[in-house]
Image (cartoon, coloured by chain):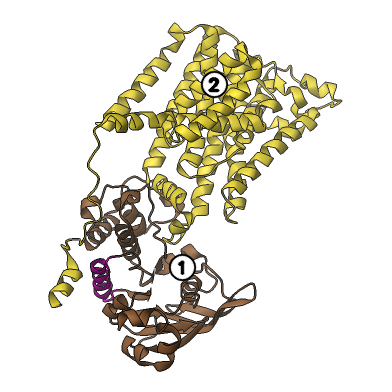
Chain colours: A yellow, B brown
Amino acid sequence: MKKRLELSFDAAMLAALALAPFYLSSYHLSLLGRFLALAILSLGISLIWGWGGILSLGQGVFWGLGAYVLAMHLKLTGLAPGDIPDFMMWSGLDHLPGWWRLFQSPLPALVGAIAIPAAVAAGLAWLVFDRRVRGVYFALITQALALAFSTLLISEQAYTGGFNGLTDFTTIFGRVIIDPGFQRGIYWITLATLALCFLGCRWILNASFGKVLLAIRDGESRVRFLGYNPAAYKTVAFALAGALAGLSGALYILHVGVISPAMVGVVPSIEMVIAVAVGGRASLPGVILGTLLVNFGKDWISSAMPEVWQLAMGLLFILVVTVLPQGLAGIPGAAARLFRPRRKRQEPEAPRREMRKGAAMAAQEKD
Amino acid sequence: MTSPLLSVENITVSFDGFNALDGISLQLMPTSIRVLIGPNGAGKSTLLDAIIGHVRPSSGRVVFKGRDITHMEEYRIVRDGICRKFQAPGVLESLTVMDNLNLAARRRRECWRSFSRGVAGGTYEQAERVLKLIDLAGKRNLPAGQLSHGEKQWLEIGMVVASDAELLLLDEPAAGMSHGESEQTAALIRELSSQHSFLVIDHDMAFVDQLDAPVSVMHMGRMLKEGTLKEIRNDPQIAAIYLGRDKEASVA
């Protein structure tokens, strides 16, 4: 019953989203498209934080890696042969750096946008988790990483476009990006990718992997003393979240047409986590919904009263943590508990349990 | 003469210069029970920690099934056949009772083998068997966090049993249990000792008496005496120094 309800909720959400190009203005469709792209990243945060108990305040790094890799490709495809991007010329470079060339053709760029963040995430995670660093210390490490990443991007202007980042993309795979028909296509591609990632995550979490991950959140050392190596599981989860973040970043820039250090630093990374907390970190549909609502809210508030946005975000976070620890996904359960007549409590501690089985019975008979 | 399953050889563990274990040795035969008693701070839990790799001894070694495991990774020691119940109940609270047991009974514990749905037949049967043994069949789908304290204790004992390890280390399995519950626990351990070896720590002398097994007394990181509970009780030195203080009066 509960399962069917969930399923119909998911299906209704998918149908509403798939039909959005027919009832939303192109402005709102573009917003929705980029927020759906962000929701892919949120699935990854749910995986590591909601299930694995790993709080990362640096998902912007992996998201940014995916975005930058695809942006490099888009930058290159718009050039006449032999040309180099404008910002490189301004910075005094006279030829394309070798590692930029890697992403000249579409396939390496697409693979790289997912594989590079996944590999970086896996490397970091293994280094840290194998040494049993966790909790707040891990969160601080990832936050420092986000800061370092955006600083590095700004300082290496000749290679990264510096503070302004990479922008002015014109074509992808031979298609004109700003063409409205193509924008609609990108919207559906984003939605389909999100749906696939959603199903993939749900499959993984229903497999033994998800159970072990949840068990690690409950008691990492208990799991270790059942013969599992938590570091391996956490590393795989973190790498998966990195891959999802990279994919999300790559799709995102197709909607907005720009990537810059300000979009990948500490503050965006924290906003990503807040969106997940609002939706309910352990619920996959919840985090998608949370991401959409928080980001539409952000767009709405920051266009009406730009200075209030960060304050509102902070208040929202406090509200969720104190009142709704399970986020929006916890509302149905909380409501049900509120309205359903109190269930009789489990009979408290039967004074002497009836033994039905085995040795104890035999032993008692002997007595 | 069979060779011992576990042999702790002259182990010393120190924390900041204080020797929690001071050259301690212990041998355990296959399918036998050994009880460890001693006052708080005697080093009983630390001994279990050292066996399972939770703390590393500064000297001495731990040999299990003829193999030196002193510096093995904890999870590899477990896969090798030693499983431990910790003092505080450590069930996995958001998993159901059955999932707790499945997780413990699972043989494929490597990460890359965890991307399959469902539970292998052998694992499932093992979990079912243990579920009946610990009498929680009616609560199989309940999240473990909702169990009572005694039930959690049993579930964790069940998890250790489900792991099918040859050597089971139980740290105060009867703590917080009612008289009847601890009686059942002792009976369970006695029955299972036909397939597993047990190293049990407990303070409850009635429980230790029901286990009906050789007792080792520890004090200040050393092994003071080994014998039956009766011999231990009648040892004037031990009675005077340890048991006499708190436990013996209530048991006698």
| Callout 2: SS | helix
In the rendered image, residues at marks 2 and 1 fall on the same chain:
no
Question: What residue is at 23 percent from the left and 33 percent from the top?
Answer: A341
Amino acid marked by disc 2: Asn
- Left or right: residue B99 versus residue A363 is right
Quadrant assignment for the C terminus of chain B: bottom left
> Which region of the structure is painted magenta?
B178-195
Could you tell me what secondary structure mostly forms the magenta stretch?
Answer: helix
Classify residue A113 by image quadrant. top right
Residue at mark 1:
B77
Q: How packed is label 1: few (under 14 Cα within 10 Å), some, or many (20 or more)?
A: many
Please tell me whether residue B190 belongs to the stretch shown in magenta. Answer: yes
Q: Pick whichever, B121 or B157, lies toward us.
A: B157
Classify residue A6 by image quadrant. top left
Quadrant assignment for the N terminus of chain B: bottom left
Amino acid marked by disc 1: Ile
**Residue A205: image location, x then y, percent:** 40, 41
Q: How packed is label 2: few (under 14 Cα within 10 Å), some, or many (20 or more)?
A: many
**Residue B184: image location, x then y, percent:** 23, 69
Residue at mark 2:
A295
**Residue A364: image location, x then y, percent:** 16, 73
| Callout 1: SS | helix
